[in-house]
Image (cartoon, rainbow, N blue to C red):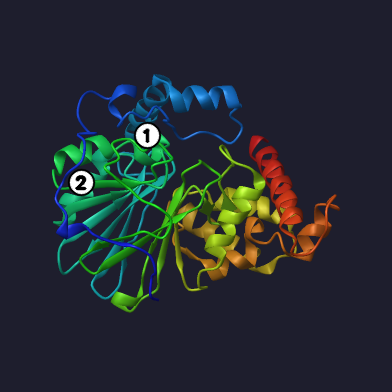
Amino acid sequence: MQIPGPHIDLLSLKRGGGDQGSGDVGPGHHGGSRAWGVGLSTDVPPCRYSLYTRTWLGYLFYRQQLRRARNRYPKGHSRTQPRLFNGVKVLPIPVLSDNYSYLIIDTQARLAVAVDPSDPQAVQASIEKEGVTLVAILCTHKHWDHSGGNRDLSRRHQDCRVYGSPQDGIPYLTHPLCHQDVVSVGRLQIQALATPGHTQGHLVYLLDGEPYEGPSCLFSGDLLFLSGCGRTFEGTAETMLSSLDTVLGLGDDTLLWPGHEYAEENLGFAGVVEPENLARERKMQWVQRQRMERKSTCPSTLGEERAYNPFLRTHCLVLQEALGPSPGPTGDDGCSRAQLLEKLRQLKDLHKSK
């Protein structure tokens, strides 16, 4: 697959720009941004979300999460397996209570890119074990459970750049990315795709499989999970639908590497809204076997997700009939699908709270 868009050759650039990673952790030391976030449950009211994303409380809550998770899961919440391709390795790193960070490694050049390094200690341990040099951090969004390791890792690895959306207040951001920008590291070509909704500046990252003759890989942050999607904290249902449609346009063999281990819970909800979906039933059986042994359920593929993820199936008549009539036109109309997506999200939040 040939990726269009501006290319940023990481190895040809020197560290520059303002010293956005200096000083103590706090609102005044995030490149002027106070738009912080944390890992939040889906029933957080707007006032609390604002406190967590715009004040010190967000960082303090994240640090508390980190300490508890390290004590509870000293070896990580799940057992993961790397995927090896022709000169490329994708290594999931279980962090916090259910998050995943990732190392994308050019095995020939011994260079690595970290995606959403929320626990710098766990990510650094993987870097040392793999014997690679960290040259870039890709943040999908600002929430601390995805960006909490930016400071420590960028300080430890002096040539490491921090990439993300300039609209999202990414901690210690050094190099902003726009839609379809491409970061090149060795043989790795990774394209940023703007997918607002969960946050205003949310990005997903698409690793092009063509250079290593393998499947492309989508690192989806909190946009898309196995059989689920993130909550729309900073947008509308229409915005989230457009973002989901962006990734729906990718190939069926694209590997999905999500930001959280939510598979069993999400598939349970999918069974409520579409109980006769055999693809969901088969996937649930596999996921339950995996989780009984604390094994990770990622990656999935976009082809699989199309078959059972209700948030990607708002065009399907079976879901439209199950959730009742919409006040707008039916079929593929964007407004009607957005209304269905919003209803699905509301039902999912109720399902989780039970």
Position above or below: 176 against 3: above
Q: Does residue 312 appear left or right of residue 315 in this picture?
A: left
The answer to whether residue 26 is visible is no
Q: Look at the numbered disc 1 and give the secondary structure of its residue.
A: helix
Q: Is residue 302 visible?
A: yes
Give the number of marks: 2
The residue type indicated by label 2 comes to Ala
Relative to 27, 107 lies left or right? left
Disc 2 target residue = 125
Q: Nearer the viewer, residue 75 or 119?
A: 119
Q: Residues within 10 Å of mark 1 (few under 14, many from 20)?
A: some
Q: Residue at x 23, y 72 (%)?
A: 87
Q: Quadrant of residue 156?
A: top left
Label disc, if present, on residue 79 of the rendered structure: none
Percent x, y for residue 293? 44, 54
Looking at the image, which residue is at 13% across and 43% down? 158
User: Relative to the observer, which residue lies in front, 125 or 158?
Assistant: 158
Instruction: From the top left corner, tell me how far across and down residue 33 is, in percent.
Output: 37, 30
155 w.r.t. 123: above or below: above
Residue that badge 1 annotates:
69
Q: Amino acid at mark 1?
A: Ala
Closer to the chain start, of discs 1 and 2, is 1
Please state if 43 lies on the left or on the right of 186 as rendered. Answer: right
Residue 219 lies, with reference to residue 282, above or below; the image says: above
Q: Quadrant of residue 19?
A: top left
- Quarter occupied by the C terminus: top right
Q: Position of residue 261 (x, y in %)?
A: 47, 49
